[in-house]
Image (cartoon, grey):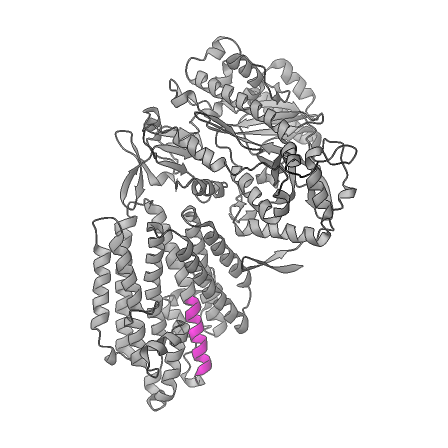
Amino acid sequence: MLARLAEHLYWHGRYLERAEGLARLVNVNAHLNLDLPGRMAPGWEPLVRITGNSELFKEFYGDEVGERQITKFLIADERNPGSLQSSLELARENMRAARDLLPREVWEQMNGLYLRVSEQITGNISKRRRHDLLGDIIQGSQQIAGMLMGTMSQDHAYDFILIGRYLERADVTTRILDVRADDLLPEHAEEVPAFESIQWMSVLKSLTGYQMYRRHVRTRVSGRDVLRFLLRDRMFPRSIMFCLKSLESILDDLPGDDDSALRATTSLMRHLDSARIVQLKGEPLSEFIDRIQIELGEIGQHISQTWFQSAPE
Amino acid sequence: MDSLIVSGGLFYSLKRVVYRGMNLNDYKVSEFYDELITPSGRPRAATRALWKYLKSLDAEEINERKVACEVAALVAGITFRVYFEDSGVDRAMPFDLIPRVIPKKEWDQVSEGLEQRVRALNMFIDDLYNDQNIIKDGIVPADLITGSENFREQCRGFSPPLGVWAHICGSDLVRGGDGTIYVLEDNLRIPSGVSYMLENRQVMKRVFPELFEDSGIQPVDEYPAQLFDMLASLSPRPVEYPNVVVLTPGVFNSAYFEHAYLAQQMGVELVEGRDLVVDDDNDVFMRTIAGMKPVDVIYRRVDDAFIDPEAFRPDSMLGVPGLMRAWRANKVALANAPGAGVADDKVVYAYVPEIIRYYLDEEPKLANVPTYKCSDPEDRKYVLAHLEELVIKPANESGGYGMLIGPRSTKKEQGEFAKLIKADPRNYVAQPTLALSTCPTMVPGGVGARHVDLRPFVLSGQQTFVTTGGLTRVAMKAGSLVVNSSQGGGSKDTWIVDTEAASRAGGES
């Protein structure tokens, strides 16, 4: 397949997963704010930092850091290249560029999702409407993934969509963990037990992982176990390990002699396996997550050098 | 009023126009020839089944179908981009519910006429780039070439395989007041619109399945397979599965939808110039994730001038350096061949009847519109004196740009065109305003008569293939003669109806 199209499909996979991830991220934060008493609630500021857009936000909104500004910035602001709206648009444009490789119905679905969301995303979005909208985006993204799995030949074109998707999904899961890692719990140590499990349940639910966690982990929800589940579980499709394992098997099948992307993936899996999760809290957890994000970025660079470099600019 | 429409699990809100039923009984046949209705107000023979069916629908049912069409088109992304509109916003091409119907008997004759015409035009192009016998024999003047923007020096002394230059031709046909079908122009460079023909049929089958049972409507779906076979037959390498690609200028081109659609329907790669390379041995390759892969046939949808910066415009970012030398070395086939446009210039058009007689020794089977050549002093004098009655066309523009429609023009516009013609007479021709035929069309408030044309597509390789019908374009504004999609025109499904087959199958007698 054409190197250029492989690259478009890879980015389509990434951006659609990113849009879904942002929807999940906003949802988990909204739930946390509802579930926790005021002084322990995280507010909205952490999301801006976690998505890596603090400077841009300050430029557009100055010191107005309310829920309204931040959710607008994250969801609907076209000036923010990392907003949900921008991600969805890029997911669509990248798919459009390669759509002759895909079943037509999938393109119709993508185009429909984009048009529908663009229409609803304008103006002020009430909390209630926001919840529906984000749910719709998550469902739309899942539908596209399902249609691809059910109707597209599992060829290299499909592989590149999956590569983009799993790489981005691993990244999204780290950012959702970041929301939790960032909280102020240690300062309210005596109240922690009462709220800890609520917080981790929110994290699990935002990844549609609560039921799967209960089935497979079988313990009450605790930070250590949830972390282990989301970092290392080999069966839950949004855990980082699952994403890497999937990446590994796809990368192994791609043509070419350069296996640097594969080696970087295997290496990150080893790091995850050897991490001592019991000790990960607060600052060390944040650092650990940062490190995973950096290594994910490196995998992305290897992929681009190996398969897209012949795609001219 | 906005409304929510459910389609395949998707919700759309569309601006809703309420159509007050078809009111087919009130349909006013204009003074023009109507494609569906006789002057006495009765449906033509091939139209009877359709007309009866449409009359049976009430306003609600019509609205439902109209909305279903719009949703189907929007969801499928059947959109085109309009030049000079920098926002690049997608806009759905207006699609009209009421099909245009042509009896199969009549179409068979038109089809023969098109084959004849394209055969002669291909011989003409081949002659122009080689011996130029037609000029030596005094049939066409030499300045037809020297004055043509589309004559490519780079093609001199070369003849592509089979002597075919215009492998895909889209000729525009119109019907005049007397019911005669005329060829209005030939598009031999990169004619577009065939995807709309195919899509329109898909939409109609989705929305009016009842009509396709037993009514003798001929299918159109064969085109992509025919196109692929024709392209594959051009391969310079004698391999069983030649590598065919579609070359597009990219996603921002107004016809990108069609490029992607055809590539997908044929199951071939859609490439951009930057995906291809020509090496020192003149072999053409595309860049893939597994390295370089050879390319045999290119269905190029990039203009001549941009196709190869080595041979044409050096600033082109859309082309492939070295493509012309690969083509001339017979390492790759290009469809259409560069330089084919020399024969679709509007001045050459005036000579097509003579061209047919010269090469084929046959009488033209399809009529040409009488055409005045401004390069001819007598004709020019007439044209300048009758600007208010004539349609003035520049030789090399397409898409309806740069035209003067005399009866609808102001004195000032006429004055400007008089200046243009005097400055560059070779570049202009004039034709009488044709009383273009009309077809009943859904308009807000009911059904109105709107002018239509027809663009069939002709494939030429080892065999010739003519589409069953073609793309009917319709001017959506009352009285307007401009059907180009870039200027607000819409389209209709085109039915070639075999009334005999329909009655054999127990349909309308």
Q: Main secondary structure of the magenta part?
A: helix
For residue B100, what is the image quadrant?
Answer: top right
Residue A4 drawn at (x, y percent): 35, 46
Horizontal placement of A46 versus B493: left or right?
Answer: left
For residue B1, what is the image quadrant?
Answer: bottom right
**Residue drawn at x 38%, y 65% as measured from the top left:** A53
Q: Nearer the viewer, residue A7 or B195?
A: B195
Q: Is residue B288 above or below residue B329?
A: below
Q: Is residue B141 magenta?
A: no
Residue B322 drawn at (x, y percent): 32, 31
Q: Is residue A31 magenta?
A: yes
Horizontal placement of B420 versus A255: left or right?
Answer: right
Horizontal placement of B56 versus B217: left or right?
Answer: right
Count of numbered badges drawn on the protein = 0
Q: Is residue B164 above or below residue A311?
A: above
Decide if residue A39 is in sight here. yes
Return the residue found at the far top.
Answer: B137
**Residue drawn at x 64%, y 13% as measured from the top left:** B378
Residue B61 drawn at (x, y percent): 69, 53
The quadrant in which the C terminus of chain B is found is top right
Magenta extent: A22-36
Decide if residue B302 is in sight here. no
